[in-house]
């Protein structure tokens, strides 16, 4: 336990950052609402910090209400001209009629997708010398790029489905040749996804050439790099939550029974047709094995704090295929990450408390590093 563990939580101000420029903006708002409620239950003082779709930072009034209103009316404009720059132990807005500066002790970035879990805000917070919840710059950036993550997972000996990486520039220049190469090397059915995105945004399943071309076009709208993966027939979707720094632990596994053909954005957030089986109906041997695989994946990308690791289980062979690792998974009340820990004996308020303490522990350790000769 770090020295921060003895501090009165009422004296710890947690800046919760939410919203952001990614296509997962609305998911972030839903996650932040629950995270802030749980932090207050755990005894922390919460400082809400919103980021508009345009990248403006909101600190006054009720940023969550303002961004929720904008989300309901996407053509609306920002209600604030506040903008932040990093500063020691604080986020400093432009001066606005004498408003107090929102001093914080630690940041909880509840941001999903690009500009939130890809190392960008983590780098900003490192420059500001602020403790923050979750993975550092390296793990965040690597895990967001599914192509780069796959290379590290392969080096760690983790089983993955065959895949190909396509680049938007090459796709625009020679799409027919690339489609033929993919068909020859992977066959159908296929999953196509942007390499740097989450929440199944831009993900499609392709069963023939026409669907493959449409899927690649859609993915190219979100990222310049596209991942095409061979599907696992009749795969079961198994997820494991990981918590910790140097000695991470894995939750009980959960299984998703998608209400749609696969667990897409609508199935995750817009309807309740999907089922979450917690714990997953697995044998004790399978549980131990997939937990060990999740921890190996966590360590492979140098993760810290938290992550959710997703697998595809081929029931016929019993093989677990590592699908991806998510370093800032959803934190809504129905999200798999907190539900898996609740089933493992850690309720939501205790979970966010542990995450804050892990952030402070990691920060104190990093402060031991010399920054000058």
Image (tube, rainbow, N blue to C red):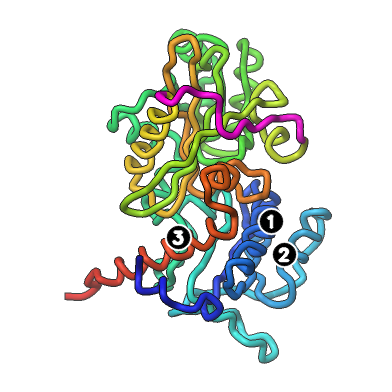
Location of residue 33 by image quarter: bottom right
Residue positioned 61% across, 35% down in the render: 200
Which is nearer the eye, 314 or 247? 247
State the residue position of label 2: 64
The quadrant in which the N terminus is found is: bottom left
| Dominant secondary structure, magenta | loop
Residue contact between numbered discs 2 and 1, judged by CB atoms under 8 Å: yes
Mark 3 is surrounded, within 10 Å at the Cα level, by few (under 14), some (14 to 19) or many (20 or more) other residues, namely many
Res 304 visible? yes
Q: Position of residue 247 (x, y in %)?
A: 32, 50
Q: Is residue 197 magenta?
A: no
Of tags 2 and 3, which is closer to the observer? 2
Q: Position of residue 368 (x, y in %)?
A: 25, 71
Label 1 sits on a secondary structure element that is helix
Disc on the earlier residue, 2 or 3:
2
Q: How far apart, in angstroms, are the residues tagged by discs 2 and 1? A: 7 Å
Residue positioned 43% across, 71% down in the render: 130
User: Residue 29's mark?
Assistant: 1
Q: Position of residue 79 (x, y in %)?
A: 77, 70
Q: Which stretch is magenta?
A: 272-285
User: Residue 122's mark?
Assistant: 3
Of tags 3 and 1, which is closer to the observer? 1
Label 2 sits on a secondary structure element that is helix
């Amino acid at each position: 336990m770090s020295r921060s563990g003895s501090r009165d939580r009422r004296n710890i101000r947690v800046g919760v950052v939410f919203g952001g420029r990614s296509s997962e903006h609305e998911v972030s708002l839903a996650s932040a609402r629950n995270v802030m409620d749980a932090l207050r239950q755990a005894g922390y003082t919460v400082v809400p910090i919103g980021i508009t779709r345009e990248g403006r930072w909101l600190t006054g009034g009720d940023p969550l209400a303002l961004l929720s209103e904008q989300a309901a009316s996407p053509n609306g404009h920002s209600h604030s001209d506040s903008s932040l720059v990093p500063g020691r132990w604080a986020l400093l807005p432009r001066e606005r009629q004498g408003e107090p500066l929102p001093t914080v002790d630690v940041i909880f970035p509840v941001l999903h997708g690009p500009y939130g879990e890809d190392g960008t805000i983590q780098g900003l917070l490192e420059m500001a010398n602020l403790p923050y919840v979750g993975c550092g710059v390296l793990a965040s950036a690597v895990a967001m790029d599914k192509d780069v993550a796959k290379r590290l997972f392969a080096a760690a000996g983790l089983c993955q489905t065959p895949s190909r990486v396509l680049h938007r520039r090459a796709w625009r220049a020679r799409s027919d040749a690339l489609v033929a190469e993919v068909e020859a090397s992977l066959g159908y059915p296929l999953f196509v996804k942007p390499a740097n995105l989450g929440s199944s945004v831009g993900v499609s399943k392709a069963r023939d050439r026409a669907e493959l071309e449409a899927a690649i076009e859609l993915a190219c709208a979100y990222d310049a790099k596209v991942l095409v993966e061979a599907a696992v027939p009749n795969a079961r979707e198994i997820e494991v939550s990981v918590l910790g720094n140097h000695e991470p632990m894995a939750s009980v596994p959960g299984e998703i029974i998608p209400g749609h053909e696969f667990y897409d954005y609508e199935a995750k957030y817009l309807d309740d047709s999907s089922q979450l089986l917690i714990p997953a109906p697995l044998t004790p041997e399978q549980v131990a094995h997939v937990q060990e695989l999740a921890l190996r994946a966590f360590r492979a990308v140098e993760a810290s704090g938290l992550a959710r690791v997703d697998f595809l289980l081929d029931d016929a062979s019993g093989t677990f295929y590592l699908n991806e690792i998510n370093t800032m998974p959803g934190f809504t009340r129905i999200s798999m990450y907190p539900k898996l820990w609740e089933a493992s004996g850690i309720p939501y308020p205790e979970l966010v408390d542990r995450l804050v303490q892990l952030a402070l522990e990691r920060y104190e350790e990093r402060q031991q590093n010399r920054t000058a000769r």
